[in-house]
Amino acid sequence: MLRLAITAILLWLTPLYGASADDEACRVIRNEVETTAPRVLSGRESGQHLGTLCGYSNVECDGFGRQISIAALEKRGLSLKRAGLDYLLDGSSFIEIAEVDIDNDQVPDLRLWQVVGSAGCQKNYIFIRTGANSYTLRKFEEFDTLTTEGGFCYDDTLIVSRYKQTNYLVAFSPQRTAIFRGTPGGSLVQACSFTPIERWSEDQKQVADLVRKSYPNMPSALKIQRPELERLNFDNHAPFARKGDLVWTVVAKCGESQHAYAIFMVHPKRRDIRFIIEPGGTSSRGCN
């Protein structure tokens, strides 16, 4: 009996010691990528979103939402002019800034990104912190084979995902997704790569079925996209849900149409439904 017990314990421990931390992270992150939309994963990123850069001709600091001024950025030790990126201020695309530990040295770095062009290409600029109020722009050649025109275009995007106190850069593409672990000093180690396959959880299936049954008169050819559990950023859906609450977002489209026939919110606990675009309403795109 004792030998059997010891054998069982060893068998239980083998996966823990036989698989590397990167292998475990890849399994977890791949599951997230295949069951969650990239835009939702981006909203759950590790680190702190400092805001939209402002304080120049195209973006004044008197708008709404979270913003960080050029002066505040320079006070942190980062000057776009010294980094040779001041040309970014001549464009009309917003520049977002987040503080996140890219190289896993327990010191937060800075990530700047913007979406440009008709292809919606996401351009990323990563600054590794090298000291107090000191950053160095780090370019990653590892992304060159994964991106279009030196950026993440169309459905591609860069996501920072955290697993067991370690941050990973997820270069998402429907054709090939790669996961990288940043190391102290700014280099990257590729943990894995794969072709993502969209999968639905049981909760996602149940939510989609609930919407279809609750609105039986919707066209039979209607395609309900995979529901996504998202956090509300605004407080304009009360009392159904308030800012910061998680709700299921369900989009129904006519076949391959890019326009929504209807958009619903489903409460994750109560399972009641509220529409953002009413099926067949004035904002609905018909299936003719």
Image (cartoon, rainbow, N blue to C red):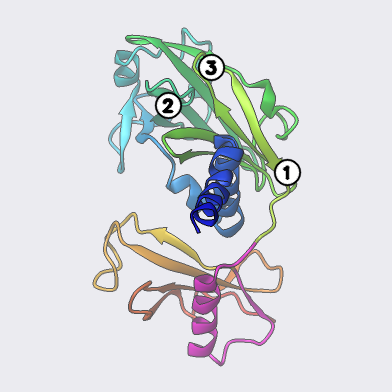
Total labels drawn: 3
Instruction: Verify CB contact (< 8 Å) between mark 3 and mark 1.
Output: no
Give residue 196's position: percent from left, percent from top. Answer: 69, 52
Q: Amino acid at mark 1?
A: Arg
Q: Amino acid at mark 2?
A: Asp
Toward the viewer: 20 or 237?
Answer: 20
Q: Is residue 109 left or right of residue 14?
A: left
Toward the viewer: 232 or 276?
Answer: 232
Q: What residue appears at the point 47 percent right and 17 percent down from the top-left corner?
A: 128
Q: Is residue 260 magenta?
A: no
In the rendered image of this protein, does residue 118 appear above or below residue 268? above
Residue at the disc numbered 2: 101
Residue at the disc numbered 1: 176
Give residue 177's position: percent from left, percent from top. Answer: 68, 42
Provide the secondary structure element on which disc 1 rests.
loop
Q: What residue appears at the point 46 percent right and 67 percent down from the top-left corner?
A: 249
Other-residue count near label 3 (Cα within 10 Å), few / some / many at <14 / 14–19 / ≥20: many
Provide the secondary structure element on which disc 3 rests.
loop
Q: Is residue 120 left or right of residue 50?
A: right
In the rendered image of this protein, does residue 136 appear above or below residue 147? above
Q: Which residues are magenta?
A: 199-225
Toward the viewer: 87 or 247?
Answer: 247
Place residue 170 in its image quadrant. top right
Place residue 261 in its image quadrant. bottom right
In the rendered image of this protein, does residue 239 appear above or below residue 145? below
Q: Which numbered dot is residue 27?
A: none
Q: CA distance from mark 3 to mark 1?
A: 23 Å
